[in-house]
Amino acid sequence: MKTSGKKLWFKVIALSISLMLLLSMFVTTGIGISGAAIPEWQPNTDYAKDALVTYSGKTYQCIAAHKSLDGWQPPNVPALWKESTGPVTPPSTPVVVTPTVPPGGQTFTISGVIKADVTSNNPAVNAGFKVEASGMSTYGISDNNGYFTLSGFPPVSANITLKITKTNHLRREIQGIRLSGHVTVGSANKPVQMWAGDMVIDGKQDDAINMSDIVELITSYNTSVGNPGYKAESDFNMDNAINMEDILIIINHFNKSMADYQQDYDYNTITYTPVPTSSMTTAPTSTPTNTIPSTYTPTPTPTYGTPPPPAQRMYVGYAGTWNTSIYDLDPKNIPNYFTHVNLAFARPDTTYQKGSYAFDQAVAGFEFVEGATTFTGQKKFTPQQVQDFKNIIAALKARGTEVWVSIGGWAYSQGSQWANFNAPHVVDLALDLGATGIDVDWESSGSTVKKGPPDTFSCSKDGEIKGIVSSLYNEIKSRGVKMGISIAGWSTGAYYVLGTPFEEGKVQWGSPFGGTMYRVVKDNGHMLSHINLMSYDGGEYYDPREGYEAYRAIYDGPINVGIEIAPEGSGGAVLKLNAEPGSAYDGEMLTGQNNMASKYYNVETLVNYVKNKGKPFDGFMIWQIWKQRVHQPAPAGAATENSAGQYICRNLPLRGDPNQTIPSLPPLKP
């Protein structure tokens, strides 16, 4: 051990002396490096995602592919451009190309986790690794978490080799992989490590890390973002500068070649998951590729004020997918005071495979006209529609509106869908869409309540809903991705607990869903980002203010009080905009009697209650954005989607323009 330690120390000293000599040569001789100039922004130009331009002395990075127009200068359209303060980072969502598979053929997926052996505060160091399979025209690109997926492989008898590459990194090959089922190569705990330092010299890499690589790195040494000689691909730790830290990264694996990877790799990290014939993935009719040009152009939307603080109030809008199109979600149709759009609904038992882009009703559950189940057969998203859908979501997120996938809903909760809930498939779907989080709308009926004090209170289906939230939380955590979880809380879901103000009779009598959310919120609330309280469909005796307080008694996080545009699904209550003259926003509540509450069921009262009695991060939720469009007009005197949203924006208040409206769009037929 002492001898090898001395050898390593002498090696470091020798390399350091060589480096100092080389550095002094470059400093004293004034050798300069010319870098490629970033072009000036131009109108009527096609820009790809991540393209760089300059405008008014600043550098901007393209967020969504588009064709520029007059007036769409980067500062004017934050949905399309962001100011670049560092090197271009690879996309945060894995890019996947799938091979062609005969219709009806069985397919498998290869996925895994890659990690750059680099100390860095920038997670993008793990992104951009290209993974190719031998003998097949398919590849995947890792995301910021190092996660990659290759989908659509037919079974083959011969073993295949995975080749992993990235500019200025030592190429790696993992051999002997058999395609007899889904394959996982590496994990968050034991990722496939990649070594930086095999520099591209004269357009080639020599599959080794040696002195020529150090010499090449020194050509851009002591440069930073904005300097002509700075090369982002040589900034291994992505700290916006090329310095001694990057040279030490090369030294860490100095004199190594591809053969040294094999000695370093634990083949036990490869796992094989057999797939029963009955559950094999069938290749979609149309297979997306990452080379499809996008025709969708997000509509520029103005911004108002400054970015909100972390504790901003939310306004969540559920966007039902039936009788609508993915193109209806264009930011121009969604007022910018919506902080969240929940896509409703995906199937809890979805068989979605990462990289398949099967966003249709049969697989994902969404009922958009582009992928609806019809009397004439199942419609499938075209490759162009897949790309456009992802671009729309990216445009909403870029302007400050998060997009969540809502799973379940009434239609997907009445059979065995929740019993067959599959957290990995749901997370795969959300990741492929670029969603920010997953909303659990568990509307399972038939849960019986065992009324008791807080410690013993329980329902017969507590195990199901707690298992759903826990498995989803653990799946997200195991992948190391940043993704939130919310639940849609039943109106009376925290009622009927003995010894509290919410005992049956003190609040609403006989609700079939009374207490069904109590246990999961109380025991698993730390796993939730927020609760969307379905404080509607409860009839004229249900008081949303009391419903809010029942959840607040057991949950410290954000609660979004829900409103529904009349006519409601059940109960007959009608949401109005303004309060009756002289009524108090906190009057006649928690009196120990189940009062008629319709006097207080209006947007004005609820806004005042949340603003004055709630927490500073509580907000609102609306069911749903397209309610009148896909159902029927609101009755005379009732609040509408626009009047309610604008009132909340002005008076809660919300960030955004309270004059923006949801346009009147016709319902669509698939």
Image (spheres, helix red, strand yellow):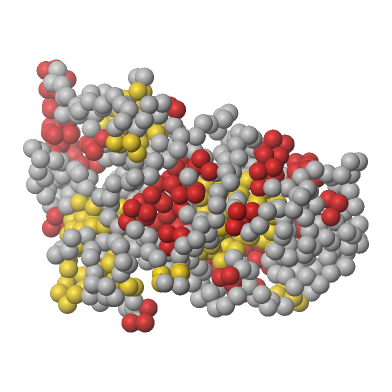
Vertical position of residue 417 compared to residue 288: above or below: below
Count of number-bearing discs = 0
Whole-percent x, y for residue 538 in the image:
77, 63
Residue at 57%, 78% in the rendered image = 415
Which of the two residues, 648 or 578, is positioned nearer the viewer here?
578
Whole-percent x, y for residue 222 in the image:
24, 26
Q: Is residue 50 left or right of residue 366?
A: left
Q: Residue furthest bottom?
A: 277
Q: Is residue 283 left or right of residue 328?
A: left
Q: Is residue 125 left or right of residue 389?
A: left
Residue at 73%, 47% in the rendered image = 639
Vertical position of residue 140 compared to residue 273: above or below: above
Which of the two residues, 376 or 622, is positioned nearer the viewer here?
376
Q: Write down the quadrant of residue 84 in the picture.
A: top left
Which of the two residues, 186 or 24, is positioned nearer the viewer here?
186
Q: Is residue 90 visible?
A: yes
Q: Is residue 8 visible?
A: no
Quadrant that contains the N terminus: bottom left
Whole-percent x, y for residue 501 in the image:
85, 61
Residue at 63%, 45% in the rendered image = 314
Q: Is residue 472 left or right of residue 263?
A: right
Residue at 47%, 59% in the rendered image = 368
Whole-percent x, y for residue 562 in the image:
69, 53
